[in-house]
Every structure is written in C-alpha cells, then in structure tokens.
Image (cartoon, rainbow, N blue to C red):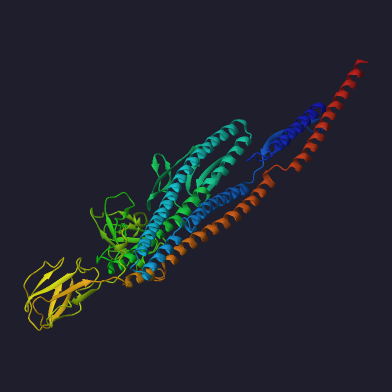
C-alpha cells in the first residue's frame, strides 16, 4: 500500500476521533449519555519484498463506555432514594395533620375534659352543661375531620399507585421496543447502537425512580424484573402491570403483573421495596393503616368509657340509661376475598380497653379458623370462639358466624373498631340531659301525717345499671285506711287498696327499687319516693377523672397518652425517613459521580483528545502532502 493510501487512512481515523470527541463535548449535559471512544485497528499489510511494511489504520467501532456494576448501583440507589423521599413526604404531611393543634385531636380532647371538669365543679350550671355538649360536638367534628383526612390520604395513595402503574407500563413498552430496535440494528450493522442504548439507559433510570428493578443484560438486550423475580420486560416483549384489590385490605389496591391474559398475585412490600411506588406501599402499611386503626380505637374507647359512666348517672329530669355518645359497633367483618360467608365482630364491655390498633386476617379451611395479627404476624388456629386469644392474650373482641355461614377458603379482614371515628356523634342535645348525678331515691314522709308509720331507705333491685326506665319517677303511697294504701306514679300501674299489716315491716317494690314500711300509718297519711339529684356531681367527677386514668387504652394509657403515642410514632418514622432520604440522596450523588468518572464526559480529557486528534489529523495531512510532493517529483523526473 502506498504512502498516500496509508496517509488517507490516518486522516480518516483522526477525523473519526475528532468527530467522536466533539460529539462527547456536545452531549456533556445529556441525561443518560455515555461517552464514546473510537476503537482503532491496523489494516492487514500486503507483502513488500521480503517484509510487511503496514497498510494503515481503520475504525473498528465507536463504542460507548459502560460499567454494568456502576449502572446497577445507580439504579439501586436511585430506587431507594425515591422510596425514602416518597415515604418521607407523605409521613411528614400526616405528622403535621395529626400533630397540629388546629387539625389534630389533642386540643379537642383537652377542651372536652376541661368542660367536664366545669360540670363537676358546677353540676347545676346550665352554662357548664351546655359547654360540655358544645365541646363534645367539637370533639366529634374533629374526629370526623381526622378520619376524613386519613380517608383522603388513603384514596390519594390508591390514585398515586394507579398513576405509577400507568407510568411503569409506558416506560416498559418503550424499553421493550428499544430492545427490538437495538437487536435489529446490531444484527445488521455489527456495530453497537450507542444512541439507542443511551436512550434505554435513561428509561431504566426513570423506571428505577418508580419501582425497584433488576436488569439482566443478555446479548445487548436488557431484561427487566420488578424486584428480583417478577418479569416486566423480556426482550422485545413487555408485560402489563395492573392494579387489583389488596387481598388483605379490600379498600386498597396493589400492583399486579398481567401476562398472557393471566393476572398474577398482587405485589406487596415483600416484592416492591423501592422507588416511589415502594414508598407509597410502605407508608400505607407502616403509618397510614395503623393511624386509621388508632384513631378509630381512641374514638371507640373514649366514647364507650364515657357512655359507661353516663349510663351510671341520672340527668336533671331523672332519666337514666342514656348514652352521651353514639357510634356504630359490632359491624360485620370486611370480606377480604369476595366470598359470601359472614363473621360478626363484637367487643364486650370488659374487652375494649384491651384492643390494640392492629388489624387481623381471619381464614377458614372448612374445619378450623386461623386468626393472624397483621402488626407482628402472630396467629392462632382453632374454633371461632378460641382464636381471639393469641399467645395466651385475649385480643378484646369476639367472633361469631353470621349468615350466610362461612365456607372453606373464606378470608376476612378484621378491624374490631373500624369506622368508629366516622360514625361518632352525640346522643344528647340538651344541657338538662347531661347525667351528672348518681341515681338516688329519697323517701319522704309527709310532714302532716298523723300516724306513726315510717318509710325506710329505697335500694335498687338487682345489678345496676341498666336501671329500670321508671326508676327515678316520683311514686306516692296514700293510705286509704290504716291497713290499705293506693300507689300512684309512672310505671307502677297505680294499684289501689294494697294491703298493709301494721306494724310491719313490709316490703314495697316498684320500678326497680324496694323499701320497707313500718309502724301504724293513719288514714290520709302519704309517703313519697322521689329523685332529688340537684347538686350531685358524683358522676361528673368520674367524667373529669377519665382524662387522667391510665388504664383506658390497651390497659395502660390515658386518652392523651394514646394519641401522643400515635403522633410520636408517625413523627419518629417521618424523621427516620427524612434522614434516610437525605442520606440516600447524598449516596446517589456519590454513585453517579463514580459512574460518570467512568462513563461520563470529562471536559478536560476531551479537550486533550481534541489536541491529540488535531495533531494526528495534521500529521496525516502532512504525510499526504509529502506523498503528493514525491509523486510530483517522480512525474517530473520521468518527463525529463
């Protein structure tokens, strides 16, 4: 090969180097771009006499510089950074919602019990009673608001999951299409499809922001798995991700792969642990669901405990057995598998302080039931009546088969106090209905009586509460003769001519109370049995004492303590997530810097290469010029 030809190959090689270097410089800020490097090879020389003098150079390829290890590290770290960022954002928002005096429950609870204290201090004050009802309404409204906000967050999470699934399908389809294009291009040209590969790398990085992925490179094709096992992209084919009902929480949705027309089992946090989607699922499981259960539990325990005491008391008009709050209880278990069998949940009056804020999964195999506590996975198997004791500890509720009867394979989500906060309301509306006094009957002999008859103290018959509805109605005994009397009063039936055998004592029983008559009443003598609760604050004192009682929630916490535990729990996880998000963001920057040091464009390095290739180009051009001059000299010599 001539000197001219060799010079031309050098010129072309230097030009390729200049063009590649300039392309690197131009794409220094292009996301996903990997710097190019020209690979040169020597041309096969032809024999020249007794030796091989060389035949110049050729460009074998302009290859992209990749580090499979560092690219994988970027995807993994990116996924975790997005996971903690998403988790932190939602957790901090919920922390503010629950902890802020204007949106949380602390202030409303404090105000309510302050009003209860005022009733205890002034049981006859209409203003104090009205303040208790008003603060009760405020407390109810605040429970509704918190529950509504949590429900909105739950809906938003479901919507975000659906949006993320749409993004995954869009990106997965593009990656599969690029896989096909890259394979086709490289098969025809036998050259790397650098620009297509860079585009695919950017898409993989975008996908890792949404969900944790594993990328398996094979012959230029990137196969993508969600997590470590769920195939999303295989070659030029992409599976579809859809959303399905969470089998353990019917109100929630989970992503699931759909391939060949078959929807695979839902993917929960055991599969999806990274990306924005992983953060959403973890936040919902670790913070939102416990918060919803905790608020329901607080509403239930507070309302039930207050009702228990209120039922012990009597209002100004002598009414008994009246609740202060109303709410829905003993709801059917939410069916977690779309079957028809019904299991009813009940909470005994002795059990509600033992109920935790965990949900449960109940399953039936046709012979035995298994109850699994979701908070820690503890479970027990046996009859429906027995499974509510886990690890020797009663869970505070009972289960009973409803209609239709459960069938083998049925599953239920059990939330013992579900929806209490939403249904909570006041059962009374008037100040006079506040039961601040202990039911008590006074027995009074009329001052104008002429006989020697006397009436003993009245006592209630049997266990109270509940009281006989007419317990506190005024009853009058009127002697129509020394041996007979008439009875008047609501609930007594107003009997006449009731026999009395002086000097007694003789028991008289009506409306759930009993007393003794004795002595020798005269005709016309009267005795009254009546409620006089004015000024009695014994029940109101119990209302006020509830605030500081430490055995009301889970048997160990006050209402305020239980709510503060929730707020602190959310705040702690939010702060931990924020710290993790910041640390992973920093780590991501470090990993990207490491990758870019290998695959990225270094302007100093490229500037040096420009000079190198410029000099190579000039040298090749000079060699061509020399060859041309020699050829001209040769022609001139021949012509002479």
Side of 431 relative to 271 (left or right): left
Residue 626 sits above or below residue 64 on the image: above
The C terminus appears in which quarter of the rendering?
top right
Q: Is residue 404 visible?
A: yes
Q: Which of the image's four quarters has the N terminus?
A: top right
Is residue 109 or residue 397 the one in the foreground?
A: 109
x and y, in percent, of residue 342 in the image: 27, 54
Residue 553 seen by the camera:
no
- Check the image and report above or below for 46 versus 390: above
User: What count of labels does the image hold?
Assistant: 0
**Residue furthest out toward the right:** 640
Q: Residue at x 43, y 58 (%)?
A: 291
Q: Residue furthest top?
A: 639
- Position above or below: 551 against 271: below
**Outermost residue, front direction?**
448
Residue 298 in percent (x, y) is at 39, 62
Query: Residue at the spot x=75%, y=31% of the render?
Result: 15
Q: Residue at x 31, y 72 (%)?
A: 536
Image spot of residue 118 (x, y percent): 39, 67
In this view of the protein, which residue sits in the foreground, 182 or 384?
384
Location of residue 369 in the rendering, given as x and y in whole percent from the top left corner: 30, 60
Task: Say which of 305 and 72 sits in front.
Answer: 305
Query: Which picture quadrant has residue 240?
Result: top left
Q: Is residue 342 left or right of residue 105?
A: left
């Amino acid at each position: 090969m001539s000197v001219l030809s060799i010079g031309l190959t050098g010129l072309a090689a230097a030009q390729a180097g200049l063009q590649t270097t300039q392309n690197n410089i131009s794409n220094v800020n292009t996301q996903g771009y990997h710097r190019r490097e020209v690979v040169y090879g020597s041309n096969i020389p032809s024999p020249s006499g007794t030796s091989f003098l060389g035949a110049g150079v050729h460009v074998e390829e302009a290859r992209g510089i990749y580090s499979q290890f560092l690219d994988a590290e970027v995807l993994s770290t990116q996924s975790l950074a997005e996971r903690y960022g998403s988790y932190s954002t939602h957790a901090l928002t919920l922390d503010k919602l629950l902890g802020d005096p204007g949106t949380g429950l602390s202030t409303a609870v404090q105000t309510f019990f302050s009003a209860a204290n005022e009733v205890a201090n002034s049981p006859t004050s209409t203003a104090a009673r009205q303040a208790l009802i008003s603060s009760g309404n405020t407390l109810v409204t605040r429970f509704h608001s918190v529950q509504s906000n949590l429900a909105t967050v739950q809906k938003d999470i479901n919507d975000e999951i659906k949006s993320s699934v749409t993004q995954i399908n869009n990106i997965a389809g593009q990656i599969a299409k690029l896989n096909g294009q890259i394979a086709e291009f490289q098969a025809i040209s036998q050259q790397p499809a650098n620009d297509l590969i860079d585009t695919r790398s950017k898409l993989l990085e975008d996908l890792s922001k949404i969900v944790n992925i594993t990328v398996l490179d094979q012959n230029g094709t990137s196969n993508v798995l969600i997590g470590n096992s769920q195939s999303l992209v295989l070659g030029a084919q992409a599976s579809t991700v859809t959303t399905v009902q969470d089998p353990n929480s019917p109100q929630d949705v989970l992503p699931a792969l759909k391939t060949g027309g078959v929807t695979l089992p839902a993917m929960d946090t055991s599969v999806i642990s990274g990306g924005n989607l992983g953060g959403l699922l973890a936040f919902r499981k670790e913070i939102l669901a416990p918060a919803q259960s905790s608020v329901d539990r607080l509403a239930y325990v507070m309302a039930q405990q207050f009702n228990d005491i209120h039922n012990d008391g009597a209002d100004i008009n002598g009414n008994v057995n009246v609740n202060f709050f109303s709410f829905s209880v003993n709801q059917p278990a939410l069916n977690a598998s779309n079957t028809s069998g019904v299991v009813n949940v009940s909470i005994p009056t002795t059990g509600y302080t033992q109920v935790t804020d965990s949900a449960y999964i109940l399953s039936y195999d046709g012979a035995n039931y298994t109850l699994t506590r979701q908070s820690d996975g503890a479970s027990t198997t046996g009859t429906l009546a027995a499974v509510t004791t886990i690890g020797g500890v009663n869970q505070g509720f009972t289960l009973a088969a409803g209609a239709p009867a459960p069938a083998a394979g049925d599953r239920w989500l059990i939330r013992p106090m579900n929806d209490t906060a939403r249904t909570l309301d006041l059962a009374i509306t008037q100040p006079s209905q506040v039961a601040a006094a202990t039911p008590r009957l006074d027995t009074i002999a009329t001052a104008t009586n002429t006989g020697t008859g006397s009436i003993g103290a009245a006592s209630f018959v049997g266990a109270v509460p509940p009281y006989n509805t007419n317990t506190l109605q005024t009853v009058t005994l009127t002697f129509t003769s020394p041996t007979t009397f008439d009875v008047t009063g609501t609930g007594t039936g107003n009997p006449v001519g009731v026999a009395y055998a002086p000097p007694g004592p003789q028991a008289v029983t009506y409306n759930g109370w009993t007393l003794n008559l004795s002595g020798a009443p005269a005709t016309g003598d009267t005795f009254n049995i009546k409620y006089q609760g004015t000024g009695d604050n014994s029940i109101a004192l119990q209302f006020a004492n509830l605030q500081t009682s430490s055995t009301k929630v889970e048997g160990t916490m006050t209402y305020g303590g239980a709510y503060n535990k929730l707020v602190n729990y959310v705040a702690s996880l939010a702060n931990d997530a924020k710290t993790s998000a910041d640390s992973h963001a920093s780590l991501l920057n470090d990993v990207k810097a490491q990758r870019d040091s290998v695959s990225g464009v270094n302007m100093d390095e490229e500037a040096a290469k420009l000079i190198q290739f410029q000099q190579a180009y000039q040298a090749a051009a000079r060699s061509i010029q020399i060859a041309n001059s020699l050829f001209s000299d040769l022609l001139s010599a021949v012509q002479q």
